[in-house]
Image (tube, rainbow, N blue to C red):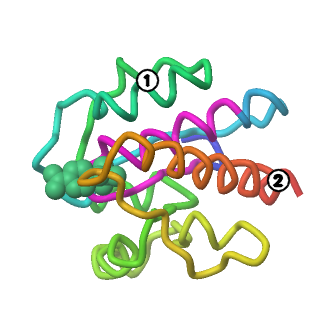
Amino acid sequence: MREPAVLFVCLGNICRSPLAEAAFRAEASRVGLEVEIDSAGTGDWHVGHAPDRRAQAVARRHGIDIAHYRARQVCAADFHRFTHVVAMDGENLRLLRRLRPADARAELSLLLDHVAGRAGESVADPYYGDAEGFDLTWADVSAGAAALVHTLRA
Ligand code: 4NP
């Protein structure tokens, strides 16, 4: 696995983490950062599913097609494969801390920890809200992606 290698994690892997993956891919590509990128969910309800239609729509509005992404569940091997495992919210992070094998290399963080002045903040779960919630999700994951790319280049 190439280094750095970044895994974005939320609950279902159909809303927030696929959008974080998409925003981070776009930003890494824009600045020429060589990095392995994936996303996963802590839950297994949506394994094999495409992203939520509202997530696909907001990505498309920003010029990115995520229709081919497929949800998967995070597993122990991910903590060895990835150098950075980046949670969307505090609940995801607590679960990842429990799943992380003691000898794993992955550093755990919240996505918004990387944004100046927003450490400890969660990307709100938009799943049960309306379509506008996904615009806020996009704004948050874009800010997080840009900040994380900046950190990894430094
Ligand atoms: P995500 O959103 O964690 O951002 O992918 C959710 C997707 C599905 C569910 C909850 C949150 N769900 O309860 O099925």
Magenta span contains residue 50: no
Q: Nearer the viewer, mark 1 or mark 2?
A: 1
The residue drawn where x is 42% and y is 70% is 89
The residue drawn where x is 30% and y is 53% is 129
The residue drawn where x is 50% and y is 50% is 137
Q: Looking at the rendering, which quadrant does residue 90 occupy?
A: bottom left
Q: Position of residue 39 (x, y in %)?
A: 41, 45
Q: Looking at the rendering, which quadrant does residue 88 occupy?
A: bottom left
What separation in Å lies between label 1 and label 2 (alpha carbons)? Answer: 23 Å
Q: Is 7 rendered above or below residue 36?
A: below
> In this figure, which residue is indicated by the disc labeled 1?
66
**Mark 1 neighbour density, 10 Å: few (under 14) some (14–19) many (20 or more):** many
| Type of amino acid at the residue the image marks with label 2 | His
Q: Quadrant of the C terminus?
A: bottom right
Quick one: 21 or 133, which is closer to the camera? 133
Q: Looking at the rendering, which quadrant does residue 10 occupy?
A: bottom left
Q: Position of residue 48 (x, y in %)?
A: 17, 31
The residue drawn where x is 44% and y is 70% is 104
Quick one: 57 or 103, which is closer to the camera? 57
State whether label 1 is within 8 Å of ligand 1.
Answer: no
Query: Considering the numbered disc 2 on the image, is that residue within a helix, a strand or a loop?
Result: helix
Query: Considering the numbered disc 1 on the image, is that residue within a helix, a strand or a loop?
Result: loop
**Mark 2 neighbour density, 10 Å: few (under 14) some (14–19) many (20 or more):** some
Q: Position of residue 80 (x, y in %)?
A: 44, 59
> In this figure, which residue is indicated by the disc labeled 2?
150
Whichever of labels 1 and 2 marks the residue nearer the N terminus, that label is 1
Magenta span contains residue 15: yes
In the image, is 98 to the left or to the right of 143? left
Q: Is 2 rendered above or below residue 16?
A: above
Which region is colored magenta?
5-26
Residue pushed farthest left?
45
Q: Quadrant of the N terminus?
A: top right
